[in-house]
Amino acid sequence: MKLEDFWYVVAEARELPVGTVLARTVLGERLAVFRDAAGQPTALRDRCMHRAAPLSAGRVEAGQLRCAYHGWLYRGDGTVAQVPAEGPEQREVAGRCTRRYATLEQHGYVYVRLAEAPEVDHPPHALPSWGEPGWGRVRLQNRFANNVTNCVENFIDVPHTVFVHPGIFRSTRGQSIEATITREHGVVTVNYAGETDNLGWFAWFLNPGKQPIEHSDQFFMPNVTHVRYAMGPRRTFLITSQSVPVTDTETLVYTDLAYDYGWVTPFVAPIIRFQSQAVIDQDLVILRQQGDNLAHYGGGFANTPADIVHVLVESIRDALAAGEDPRQLPARSHSVKFYA
């Protein structure tokens, strides 16, 4: 199993109308993404086979992609349909075909898989509550100057929140929070107990009745985190983040925020968007600073028992980097107490 075997988001579907070409990078591979003659998303290597110009600098013509340099025209399957310099009488020439990558469209996202023949057909992560009545959604995109592992750790890390997001998300209270943490079949799950109303500025909105909070975090290989807060009937907030590895030091994160707040659900998108982006903006800074230090000093962390979530996430990511199947790692379970 390799990182290239998995599906990665390259765009929201709304960003890819017919006639548009997008430049994207996944795991260092440059892609030109557009819709073919049938309106289906397609991704070609972003390199014209003629003189190596980027195909993403070209234009889409009736579902085919024309290079901006010498006008070579590519079909959605990567074959060359036209070479203008050869004149109107052209023949199909064997070998004139660039690399095409598998694509699919699901839940409003366009996905690409780099591996031609993956050992395991691992489908994209299914978004919870997608299409269910009564739910609202907000989507955000942010580019982090750090790698996927450090990003996903941050997204399911409780201790940092009182220091990086004071007031916005949590405030320092020294409150004891117990957690049960498991690793099984390539998934890390954290279930918390003991959280009350420490939810920052918008606690009055998120949990006005100060109901007991059900909070769980999950990491799904290779790059998805899911956070769930439930605070009584019709008070549920879900955060699904898909961290796309652009390079070893850059990660593009697509965040899907789903919420059910009863009758007010249709009206709260501006609040959800504002608070969520405010939190992410602070994480952008600290993760950039961490990335700078890792580039300067190299890796290596000093772990405590409270970092077992990180250790288990890293074990899965390390297995994939080594070409191993994380689902074969032994199941583990831990009980940890956090203070926040």
Image: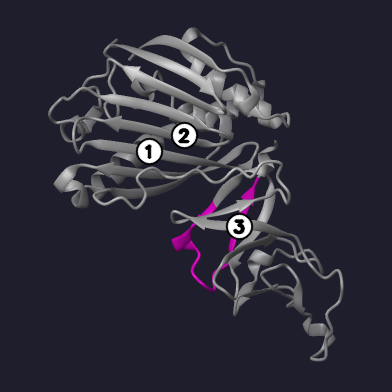
Segment colored magenta = 10-26
At x 70%, y 36%, the residue is 1
| Three-letter code for the amino acid on which mark 3 is drawn | Thr
Position of residue 94 measured from the top left corner of the image (x, y, whole percent): 87, 72
Quarter of the rendering containing residue 256: top left
Q: Residue at x 49, y 30 (%)?
A: 219
Left or right: 61 as drawn, with respect to 169? right
Q: Which residue is mark 2?
A: 225
Q: Name the residue tied to disc 3.
A: 103
Amino acid type, mark 2: Thr
Q: CA distance from mark 2 to mark 3?
A: 22 Å
Location of residue 171 with respect to 203 vertically, above or below: above
**Which image quadrant: the C terminus?**
top left
Q: Earlier in the sequence, mark 1 or mark 3?
A: 3
> Residue 196: which quarter of the image?
top left
Q: Residue at x 54, y 71 (%)?
A: 39
> Residues under labels 1 and 3: Cα distance?
24 Å
Q: Is residue 295 visible?
A: no
Task: Give the answer, above or below, for where 309 lies relative to 116.
Answer: above
* Position above or below: 287 against 14: above
Callout 1 touching callout 2 (CB < 8 Å): yes
Classify mark 1: helix, strand or loop.
strand
User: What is the x, y in percent for residue 258?
Assistant: 32, 44
Q: Which of 61/146 is in front?
A: 61
Q: Is residue 24 magenta?
A: yes
Q: Residue at x 64, y 65 (%)?
A: 56
Q: Amino acid at mark 1?
A: Ile
| Dot 2 alpha-carbon crowd within 10 angstroms: few under 14, some 14 to 19, many 20 or more | many
Position of 181 with respect to 131 (left or right) is right
